Image (cartoon, grey):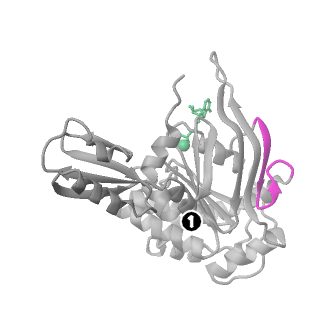
Amino acid sequence: MIPKDTSQSTVQKSFFDLTKKFQVILMNSDPDFAVEIANLNKTYDVKNGEPKRALKDINLSIPRGSFFGLLGPNGAGKSTLINIMAGLVIKTSGHVRVWGYDIERDMRQARSAIGVVPQELNIDPFFSPREILEVQAGLYGVPKKHRRTDEILKAVHLIDKSDAYTRALSGGMRRRLLIAKAMVHSPPVLVLDEPTAGVDVELRQQLWAQLRELREMGTTILLTTHYLEEAESLCDTIAIINNGELVTCQPTREILKSFDRKDIIITVSRPLDCLPEQLKVFDAEIQNDRDIVFRIKSSDSGIERVISAVAESGLGISDITTQESDLEDIFLLLTRDEPK
Ligand code: ADP
Ligand code: MG
């Protein structure tokens, strides 16, 4: 069922003002959390097969105003989770609130509070961007005089393509059009399912800029991705899910800090069979005959100790490189399947 948004106001202002305005109208006061999920489970019935537990007891709170990344490998349950928020998939048990509204009890408000950009580029190719936005606004019951079609088209940099056939738009333009479509009813929460999957580097940068702009306008943004770089560069908070389970949810900075590890790789001047005695106090190992890899905490000033210990052991140093752990290492570590 498509929600009729009865909360549309009478104001025609800038995109920024409107985004803020609607948040107030929807809730009267801003909730602390844009989305709250408690003990959420989803099991898909599979014909002639084992039921599939796609989400297992998920508890998650997404702060208002955050740029939130839901990260996980394929099949982790990301789309299931956001489709439940959007009312596209029915949960098996648990509770979900969007902008303070229960998705079952206050379904209309909950749906008005969220805009979803789906994973697939499902746009009718025979309509123009303007027509697509007008139809969508109609579906959400936004009265004609309150529609912001031009504003939104400007905001996603598609105003000069307003009347072009959508089939003539590039992939990146279609993605932006989908973002625009999700914004017609001015939802305070925008959810994007893998917005840059299969998108080339330049386009990805454009989309990132777009999303940062929307965020600055006050929109809470939730995106799913399996690109770690994307989550690391855009998101202030990251949740990692794997096999339907929440593995961690922390501010991006904290996640990176909690895996505070640095490798120092010292290439010595002659091949080694085993580690010299003096170096056995370190967490170190030999790689490729002449590289000794030392694992230290990034926050330590261990590098000096390592270098002088290597020098004292009588080994000549021909090269030194360092490597900080990044989100990729952390992700691999956290989503590594336990041996069964
Ligand atoms: P992600 O978006 O992280 O790739 P999904 O939420 O799409 O993961 O899928 C999670 C799991 O649920 C996968 O194992 C997937 O095969 C299964 N799944 C998703 N949709 C259905 C469905 N309609 N019927 C049965 N199983 C499904
Ligand atoms: Mg998915």
Q: Nearer the viewer, residue 304 or 289?
A: 304
Q: Quadrant of the C terminus?
A: top right
Above or below for 44 versus 90: above
Q: Residue furthest top?
A: 48
- The yes-or-no answer for disc 1 within 8 Å of ligand 2 is no
The residues colored magenta run: 92-105
Q: Is residue 299 left or right of residue 8?
A: left
Looking at the rendering, which quadrant does residue 321 occupy? bottom left
The residue lying at 23 percent from left, 50 percent from top is: 313
Please indicate, yes or no, whether residue 112 appears anywhere in the rendered image. Answer: yes
Give x and y (percent) for residue 102.
82, 53
Q: What residue is shown with label 1?
A: 180
The residue lying at 78 percent from left, 71 percent from top is: 30
* Residue 96 located within the stretch drawn in magenta: yes
Q: Nearer the viewer, residue 147 or 71?
A: 71
Looking at the rendering, which quadrant does residue 199 occupy? bottom left
Q: Amino acid at mark 1?
A: Ala
Q: Residue furthest bottom?
A: 13
The residue lying at 57 percent from left, 64 percent from top is: 236
Looking at the rendering, which quadrant does residue 217 occupy? bottom right
Above or below for 301 versus 336: below
Give x and y (percent) for residue 181.
59, 62
Q: Nearer the viewer, residue 222 or 8?
A: 222
Q: Nearer the viewer, residue 237 or 296?
A: 296
